[in-house]
Image (cartoon, grey):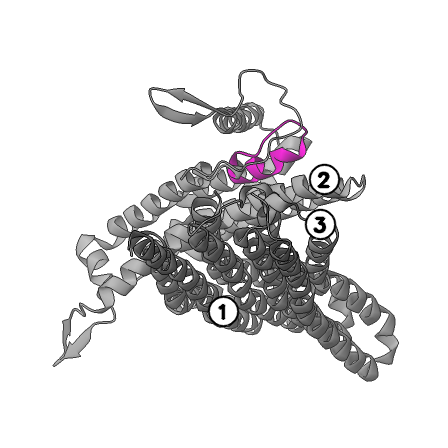
Amino acid sequence: MAVDPNTIALVQGMVYVGGGCAIGFGAIGSGIGEGYTAREATFGMARQPKMSGEVMRTMLVGQAISESPGIFALIVAFLLILTIGDITAAEATPAFAMAMLGCGLAVGLSAIGAGTGTGLASGQACRAIARNPDCAGKVTITMLLGQALATSPAVFGFVAALLLILFRGEYGVSGVEYMPYAAALIAGGLCMGAGAIGPGLGIGFVGSQACKGVGANPRHNSAINKTLLIGAAVAESTSIYAFVVFILLVLLVGKQ
Amino acid sequence: MAAETELADAITKAAQFIGAGIAMGFGAIGPGVGEGFAAGKACEGISRRPEEQSLITRTMLVGQAVSESTGIYSLVVAILLIFVV
Amino acid sequence: MDINITPEPPYRPFPGMEGESDILNLGFNMPTIFFSWFIIGLLAVVSFAVYRKLRAKPTRLQLLLELIVDAFDNLTQSSLGKRGRKYLAFVGTIFLFVWLSNIIGIIPGFEEPTRDLNTPLGLMILVIIVAHASGIRVKGLRKYIREYFEPGFKIKGRWIPNPFIAPLNIVGEIGKAISLPFRLFGNIFGGAIIIVVLSHLLLFVGLPPFLMFFFGLFVGTIQAFVFAMLAMTYTAVAIAD
């Protein structure tokens, strides 16, 4: 059966839209987060110009980690645009188009929360170091812990996007049957992406308050780190539910 | 006639899956931010009063469990939409 | 749940363990079982060997184990109080098992048992049973059941159970049980997927080992600690008045 070239063009267009969604949404969070970090760092330097070297170092480390959700989105956008761009006639199905759009949504939306959240943590770390330079090492450790935890919703989104790309050969459903499959694939992507926004932001807030706490009371950093770990782990659970629903939708329903 | 009911079934199933995705996706935003708030303030509280850490941690967990319940409702609704309805 | 998407490791050093095998109509994931027992045996042998030769001037291994035991002693006592010693072995064993299960994947050819959803699910059943059983034992069955109807109504000083709150409390307990294993599984499995896919796509030498290090050691350690801490705090919440 010959496939209409218009269909191929449409599906290919959907893949490009997915790539655009990935990096378009994905850049929001990292942008806000890094800007917030820089704001707190400049504010801290203005207060304590002597400590500008230490604050600068913390700012750069924090921004590098805050960038990583954006880099996940960038990787997926490159994958979608460069390697999946040329689709074959067999792949020109609505399910394929929806899977790639869902892939972009998953990684793009999930990067919003994590990017902003990691930025909140490193911003408060810069502020705490400017205020109390003696505890720079302890604050940096807490900041890295908080940021690693805040990135994990974005890691779920990235994994979801990679899984959707990994099964690219298995979306060849045609006929009236295609509708539920296509719907499940895009809903899975949307679910994972949107579900990771809140936990990313929330864990980032935990990290920021923990950095503030360690800066105020460096002697009790181990108790604060413990609370940070437990609180962030529980705050992460809604993004895990979103991942579970994604797995159900894509692997049990959507994959043919 | 048969084709029409088939189409209707397909549309219904598609709508269920979309609904499940939206339910879980957007339902996860609020609890995530809220639980983060609870845990963040617990960290701040422990830095102020480290001797009360077991009380603070317990209160934090109870508060998080309550604010997580809406996320669990979303999960339950999503699973119902996928498998049962 | 049958989710057969685990990426295969590049090579398997031990023959006869290709994926699942059917014994008595039950699917057995042979690598998971093998490596779980490998870790259990390793922990038992090492700790028994160190225990037999405890010295006042400790060897390096004894020092490491003492550090871990001491840290968990402090943690359990700070959140469980005087009952902490009783749960020290439970929490510490969960940490050591999950930790080794998470980081064993950085050795080429070895597979993390936690990459299989069934391992975290089994650990979850253990944790939930311990938490609820100790709740019943410490508080008594009456008070344990009464907690599900809290907060109740107070009418003329008498406590009336609230029937509408009970489903919410039960759903909350189910939510704890779901999120505990999936947190571990999702993180370890996600790390494995990222490493495999990026190694295929990028053909880049430097990045996959770095990712392996990050997800294997760093995320693996954090998640093992989180799992043990949550097991401990769920127990602490269950036995708290």
Badge 3 element: loop
Badge 2 element: helix
Q: Mark 2 points at which residue?
A: C199
Residue C111 belongs to the span the image colors magenta? yes
Q: Name the residue under label 3.
A: A86
Q: What stretch is highlighted in magenta?
A: C98-114
Q: Check the picture and name the quadrant holding the N terminus of chain A.
A: top right
Q: In which quarter of the image is residue A208?
A: bottom right
Q: Where is residue C210 in the image (x, y as percent from the top left)?
A: 75, 44
Inter-mark Cα distance, 1 to 2? 32 Å
Q: What residue type is labelled 1?
A: Ile
Q: Residues within 10 Å of mark 1 (few under 14, many from 20)?
A: many
Inter-mark Cα distance, 3 to 1? 35 Å
Q: Residues within 10 Å of mark 3 (few under 14, many from 20)?
A: some
The residue at 72%/59% (across/down) is A74
Q: Which amino acid does label 3 sit on?
A: Asp
**Could you say which disc has been placed on residue B3 in the image?**
none
Name the foreground residue: C86 vs A137.
A137
Name the foreground residue: C122 vs A245.
A245
